[in-house]
Amino acid sequence: QVQLQESGGGSVQAGGSLRLSCAASGYTIGKYCMGWFRQAPGKEREAVAGIYTGGATTYYADSVKGRFTISQDNAQNTVHLLMHSLKPEDTAMYYCAAALRYTSSYGCANFWAQQGAYDYWGHGTQVTVSS
């Protein structure tokens, strides 16, 4: 049974940093596409970052490029999202997702930002950034 468990959310002031973690169980994260999404109150869920764990190729939304870094820890079967220079507009519930149908970098590169591409989702972790 595949499960994803996010952690690391919290409240920080603008300019601060947080590191989110997504611990996967029921499968090994290697050679799949995984992503982080977020949803702010009253807004649609949006893609933040993705990673093809087979080659550690990463993808980012324009709004977070240069501030967020997605990475993998194969030993811990975990994907991280390191967030720097946080802004109030980063406030949202952050979700981890896994797309087990994509076992190549091509698939992940083309579909990482699409919610429908993902088979499994975590329950989310809240990030609140105050000004």
Image (cartoon, rainbow, N blue to C red):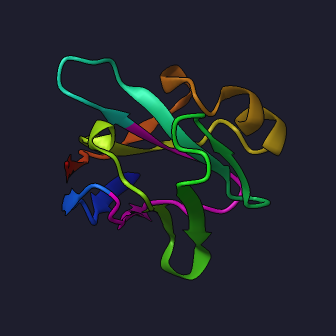
Start and end of the magenta stretch? 15-37
State how many labels appear: 0
What is the residue that sits farthest to the front in this orientation? 131
Q: Is residue 89 visible?
A: yes
Q: Residue at x 52, y 55 (%)?
A: 68
Q: Residue at x 24, y 59 (%)?
A: 9
Q: Residue at x 17, y 25 (%)?
A: 41
- Image coordinates for residue 59, horizontal then vertical, percent: 67, 44
Q: Is residue 66 magenta?
A: no
- Image coordinates for residue 12, horizontal then vertical, percent: 21, 61
Q: Residue at x 80, y 44 (%)?
A: 105
Q: Quadrant of residue 38?
A: top left
- Image coordinates for residue 87, horizontal then vertical, percent: 34, 46
Q: Quadrant of residue 111?
A: top right
What is the residue that sits farthest to the bottom in this orientation? 75
Q: Is residue 85 above or below residue 124?
A: below
Q: Nearer the viewer, residue 19 or 29?
A: 19
- Image coordinates for residue 25, horizontal then vertical, percent: 41, 63
In the visual, does 81 lie left or right of 60? left
Q: Is residue 33 magenta?
A: yes
Q: Is residue 131 above or below residue 115?
A: below
Q: Is residue 33 visible?
A: no
Q: Quadrant of residue 53?
A: bottom right
Q: Is residue 30 above or below residue 125?
A: below
Q: Is residue 114 above or below residue 103?
A: above
